[in-house]
Image (spheres, grey):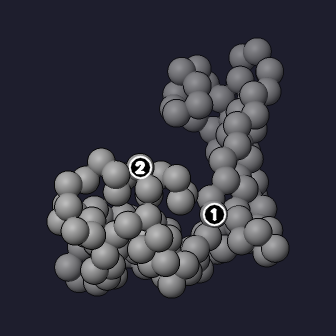
Amino acid sequence: VEIILAKACVSLKPGGRLVVEVHPFDEVRRQGLAPAFWQSAQTGLFSDRPHFWLQEQFWDEATATTTTRYLIVDAERADVTEYGSTMQAYTDEQLRKMLEAAGMSNVRGIEESDWPAGEGLTDKLRVFACEKAF
């Protein structure tokens, strides 16, 4: 994340603004502790064909990460494809420090009332705005 933030800062002119939208720490943790589930789909993100989708989440307290594993079972061929993703949880203070270390200033959280997340995402996103230091 630090490398991405540094590259974003470098690409801005002095005084340029950056908005960062992330899941808050508690949301990343909640997702990692959620129970496994499955569903079926005729088509979707993981396959153009009918398939079953098993999703499992794992929370690692030591690294503050949630790993999600997706097992996609083709309904006709019965073959399985596995995908995965990992989210790192950061506190507001950790994210603020990373933005400042990347060269950003005037780092501030934006209230949800000023940047509505949309239906189903209330309390699941946190927004920060900042400027490239002069």
Picture layout, residue 72 above or below residue 59:
above
Residue nearest the viewer, comparing 122 with 65: 65
Q: Residues within 10 Å of mark 2 (few under 14, many from 20)?
A: few
Residue furthest toward the front? 134
Residue nearest the viewer, comparing 100 with 56: 100
In the image, residue 72 lies at what x, y percent?
71, 33
Which element type, helix, strand or loop, lies under badge 1?
strand
Q: In which quadrant of the rendered view does residue 88 lie?
A: bottom right
Residue nearest the viewer, comparing 7 with 44: 7
- Residue appearing at x 52%, y 53% in the figure: 3
- Amino acid identity at mark 2: Lys
User: Which residue is labeled 1 in the image?
Assistant: 88
In the image, residue 95 lies at what x, y percent?
49, 74
5 relative position to 37: left or right: left
Q: Nearer the viewer, mark 2 or mark 1?
A: 2
Residue 104 seen: yes
User: Which residue is labeled 2 in the image?
Assistant: 7
Nearer the N terminus, badge 2 or badge 1? 2
* Distance Cα–Cα, label 2 vs label 1: 19 Å
Residue furthest toward the top? 77
Q: In which quadrant of the rendered view does residue 63 lie?
A: bottom right
Which element type, helix, strand or loop, lies under badge 2?
helix
- Residue appearing at x 47%, y 52% in the figure: 4
Q: Residues within 10 Å of mark 1 (few under 14, many from 20)?
A: some
Quadrant that contains the N terminus: bottom right
- Residue appearing at x 43%, y 64% in the figure: 102
- Residue appearing at x 80%, y 21% in the figure: 79
Picture layout, residue 41 above or below residue 13:
above
